[in-house]
Amino acid sequence: MTVRDERPRLADRGPDLAARGARPVPVAPPACPDDLPRYLGALRRLSDADDLAVAYAGCTIAVDVAGRDGSAAGLVLAYSERSSAARRLGDLPQARRDAEAAADLLEVSGAQPQSAMAALLLSRRLAVRLDLGDLESADALLAAAPFGAELPDEPEFLLLRYVRGRLHAAVGRPGEGLADLYRCGERVATLRADHPGVLPWRSAAATVLTGIGAAEAAERLAAEEVALTRRHGLASALGRALRIQGQVRPGPAGMAAAEEAVRVLQGTPRRFERATALVDLGGLLNLARRRPQARRVLRDGLELAQECGSPALVARARTYYAGRAPGRC
């Protein structure tokens, strides 16, 4: 179905993010909306390689192509993919706007409400709400979605299961969260794709396990993920794994992991992940009663959290800056 996209131009902030890329999009532009799946698939591979500014710029091209042709399906794909790139870049308000724009167009696009496209979009809508700390609306969105407890095992549905597991845990359903996350681990092992760069289920499960007192299992999973990402992985994946290890491993070893996470993430485009690592480290420094260092780290974390637009992370940074020490996970 074709539509005229008369919403405010969601590409308006594109130049700001795209300017962070130092090179043009290395993919032949889409000739027409029918060519968008090929083009956006290539951009997704760039995103997965942390070439995020370039991927974002390419997604803005896709939005323009689909918009000129009035292709609702093309706009859903383009906005959804750009939401993912914006979220990874740490522009959470833009990520949410793009994800909701895609959701607004999903029904008129002709996509089935339980399709892989719909599942992928739902996972992205949930993920950005988790980053924003908007747990109530994320849980309501999940409850209203036309997906049951059992999901197919295609990649798009596997991502939805992973995000659903994180949400279950965040709102106080750790058993359901762990069931989803362990199922993710089983499935990626079957697919021979069990790597944190594909799906970091171990670190997500480690956080949940720490919260229910299963410290030994949590430390084991976190250590496995760190080892995997050290051997073969992006710096951002290693930084995330180290950040979680810092939260689940007590004492100086946990502090060392948290400090390394900040150093590793410094050279990546994952601004929200870096902000979270700074805030987490600041909290650990508070626990260790190293207040001057904690305040320096938390100033940087607070500034970056504000730039990313996450009220929840901003609030946590301010709480730690005031001197309060965190609970473990």
Image: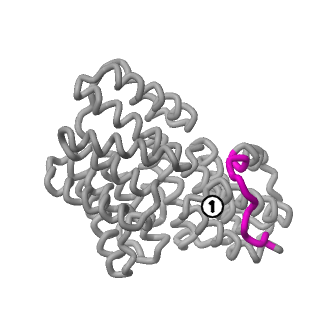
* Residue placed most toward the observer, 280 or 8: 280
User: Mark 1 — residue?
Assistant: 81
Give the colour scheme shown. Answer: one colour
In the image, which residues are magenta? Answer: 17-30
Q: At which x and y percent is residue 225? A: 31, 61
Residue at point 39%, 34% (across, down):
279
Q: Is residue 137 in view?
A: no
Q: Amino acid at mark 1?
A: Glu
Q: Is residue 199 in view?
A: yes
Residue 27 magenta: yes
Q: At which x and y percent is residue 58? A: 72, 61
Residue at point 45%, 70% (across, down):
157
* 75 sits to left or right of 324: right
Q: At which x and y percent is residue 272? A: 50, 43
Quarter in which the C terminus is drawn: top left
Does residue 251 sit above or below 25 in this rendering?
A: above
Residue 134 magenta: no
Q: At which x and y percent is residue 309? A: 55, 36
Give the prevailing secondary structure in the magenta stretch. Answer: loop
Quarter in which the N terminus is drawn: bottom right
Q: Secondary structure at mark 1?
A: helix
Residue at point 34%, 19% (across, down):
292
Does residue 166 sit above or below 16 in this rendering?
A: below
